[in-house]
């Protein structure tokens, strides 16, 4: 899952990125509203965390209003130092899905992000299955035939992306833009190398092919093969 953080206080931005990455999310950070707005409107995210007061052309509220009027429905958690009821109402009326007042605890923020990601728009249960592989998104665990499989963060994120889009062919470029952050310098070979190790972990113990290669296109995981 990929999250955009738009937050101008470098310390908070860094702490958010670190905590979210520990939970296996892929994170892009923008420190001003112009970059934030352009990333929010051009890149694909599963959720966004947007600070309300930002330097640049937009504040958090206008970023949310603008992306909503451009028909982008990504769940947004708005952060702010202000905490009165009116401010909350303005935040939610702008199209944000939730509102968190600074200072907040990271645990609460993570819980709210999980809640946003569970909403019907992203309607996916906490457990994803296909072709003998199951992945629990809350526990970050992967099982093949009841045996737990230990994966690196990137292998896990690739598998989760394939499972969320099961039966669809995903290109290496799709995988790069959904699993790595915007500034990462990733080659197609890196994707291939990660798929290779992921496969060897999933397939070797069971003599099965969990992930299919669709020559000339990309990869797919199907309900069954
Ligand atoms: Ca701020």
Image (cartoon, helix red, strand yellow):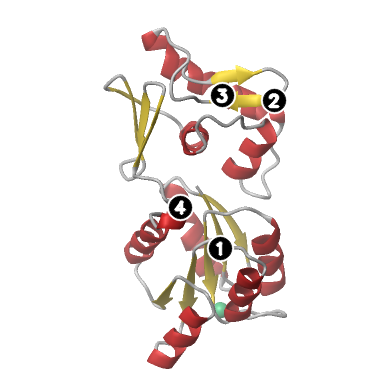
Relative image position of residue 91 (x, y in whole percent): 49, 81
Please state the quadrant of the image where ligand 1 appears. Answer: bottom right
Q: Is residue 55 above or below residue 199?
A: below
Asked whether the residues under the numbered discs 3 and 2 touch, taking CB atoms below 8 Å apart as contact, a structural biologist would say no
Query: Would you say the beta carbon of the disc 3 residue lies within 8 angstroms of ligand 1?
Result: no
User: Which residue shows up at 38% across the image and 90% down it?
Assistant: 85
Whole-angstrom CA distance, mark 4 to mark 2, is: 26 Å
Relative image position of residue 108 (x, y in whole percent): 33, 65
Q: Quadrant of residue 131?
A: top left
Q: Secondary structure at mark 3?
A: helix
Disc 4 marks which residue? 122
- Could one spot residue 84 in this view of the protein? no
N-terminal of the two: label 2 or label 1?
1
Name the one closer to the observer, 93 or 150: 93
Neighbor class of circle 1 (other Cα within 10 Å; few <14, some 14-19, many 20+) is some
Q: Which numbered disc covers residue 217?
A: 2
Q: Is residue 11 above or below residue 87?
A: above
Residue at the left extreme, as displayed: 146
Residue at the top extreme, as displayed: 207
Disc 1 marks which residue? 73
Neighbor class of circle 3 (other Cα within 10 Å; few <14, some 14-19, many 20+) is many
């Amino acid at each position: 899952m990929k999250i955009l953080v738009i937050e101008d206080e470098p310390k908070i931005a860094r702490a958010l990125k670190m905590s979210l990455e520990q939970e296996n999310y892929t994170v892009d950070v923008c420190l001003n509203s112009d970059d934030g707005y352009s990333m929010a409107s051009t890149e694909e995210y599963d959720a966004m965390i947007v600070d309300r007061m930002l330097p640049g052309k937009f504040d958090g509220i206008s970023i949310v209003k603008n992306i909503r009027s451009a028909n982008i429905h990504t769940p947004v958690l708005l952060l702010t130092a202000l905490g009165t009821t009116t401010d909350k109402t303005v935040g939610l009326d702008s199209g944000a899905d939730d509102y968190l007042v600074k200072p907040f605890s990271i645990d609460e923020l993570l819980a709210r992000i999980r809640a946003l990601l569970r909403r019907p728009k992203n309607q996916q249960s906490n457990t994803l299955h296909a072709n003998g592989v199951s992945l629990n998104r809350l526990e970050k665990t992967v099982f093949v035939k009841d045996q737990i499989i230990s994966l690196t963060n990137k292998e896990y994120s690739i598998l989760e992306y394939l499972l969320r889009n099961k039966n669809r062919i995903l290109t290496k470029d799709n995988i790069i833009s959904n699993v790595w952050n915007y500034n990462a310098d990733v080659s197609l070979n890196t994707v291939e190398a990660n798929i290779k190790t992921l496969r060897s972990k999933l397939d070797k113990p069971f003599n099965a092919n969990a992930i299919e290669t669709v020559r000339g296109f990309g990869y797919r995981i199907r309900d069954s093969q």
